[in-house]
Image: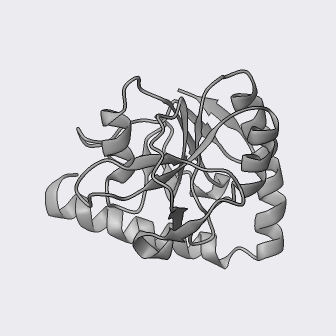
């Protein structure tokens, strides 16, 4: 599959998976999120450096509890910011309590521009396949970011097990995740 057919398929698959995720009752999402958080702590615990997280959007796994844990463990945290819609994300250091402002799609971003290079990046999943490729929202931000960061951070895709699909039909610009973490499994590529 390629070209217009692939683009249409990805769009439809995104819509299907987002509808499933958003239909999940909040209490169920919190329960699954606690299991995901426990698995993420295992993956992250032994790795030093800054953790690139994200602010939850459209019923994604909520990493805010993980942020508190990472800071308590002495890990720095950074949030992604869209600074160029055709470029990579910029990560900015942030701690709970520091000022946030609305970024693209009204997602909160750090007001203070303290650029950080994460050693690990959590990437929210709309879908993922058995080869650890991530289906995102379609903007290409995480792929461009992972391709641009040096040194390359550990890429950790985060989502729910029901978001697993056979393939995303990866293209040359798609960057596979090093790890995929769901409530049911921790997969290493």
Q: Please state which of residues 28 and 124 is positioned toward the viewer in this rendering.
A: 124
Residue 87 x %, y % = 25, 51
Q: Residue at x 67, y 59 (%)?
A: 61
Residue 155 x %, y % = 51, 35
Q: Is residue 178 left or right of residue 96?
A: left
The image quarter containing residue 175 is: top left
Q: Residue at x 16, y 63 (%)?
A: 4
Residue 93 x %, y % = 55, 45
Q: Residue at x 70, y 33 (%)?
A: 75
Q: Is residue 183 visible?
A: no
Structure colour scheme: one colour
Task: Count up the numbered dots.
Answer: 0
Q: Is residue 119 left or right of residue 39?
A: left
Q: Is residue 56 left or right of residue 127?
A: right
Q: Please state which of residues 97 and 148 is positioned toward the viewer in this rendering.
A: 97
The image quarter containing residue 25 is: bottom right
Q: Residue at x 48, y 72 (%)?
A: 16
Tell me: residue 124, above or below residue 133: below
In the current view of this chain or complex, which residue is farthest to the left? 3
Q: Is residue 74 visible?
A: yes
Residue 65 x %, y % = 78, 53
């Amino acid at each position: 599959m390629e070209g217009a057919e692939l683009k249409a398929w990805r769009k439809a698959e995104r819509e299907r998976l987002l509808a499933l995720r958003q239909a999940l009752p909040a209490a169920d999402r919190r329960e699954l999120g606690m299991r995901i958080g426990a698995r993420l702590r295992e993956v992250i615990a032994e790795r030093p450096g800054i953790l690139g997280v994200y602010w939850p959007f459209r019923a994604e796994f909520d990493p805010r509890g993980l942020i508190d844990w990472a800071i308590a463990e002495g890990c720095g945290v950074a949030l992604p910011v869209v600074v160029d819609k055709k470029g990579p994300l910029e990560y900015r250091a942030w701690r709970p309590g520091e000022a946030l402002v609305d970024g693209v799609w009204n997602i909160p971003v750090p007001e203070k521009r303290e650029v950080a290079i994460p050693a690990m990046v959590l990437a929210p999943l709309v879908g993922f396949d058995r080869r650890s490729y991530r289906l995102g929202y379609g903007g290409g931000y995480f792929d461009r970011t992972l391709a641009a960061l040096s040194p390359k951070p550990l890429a950790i895709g985060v989502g729910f097990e029901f978001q697993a699909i056979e393939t995303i039909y990866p293209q040359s610009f798609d960057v596979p995740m090093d790890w995929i973490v769901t409530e049911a499994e921790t997969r290493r590529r």
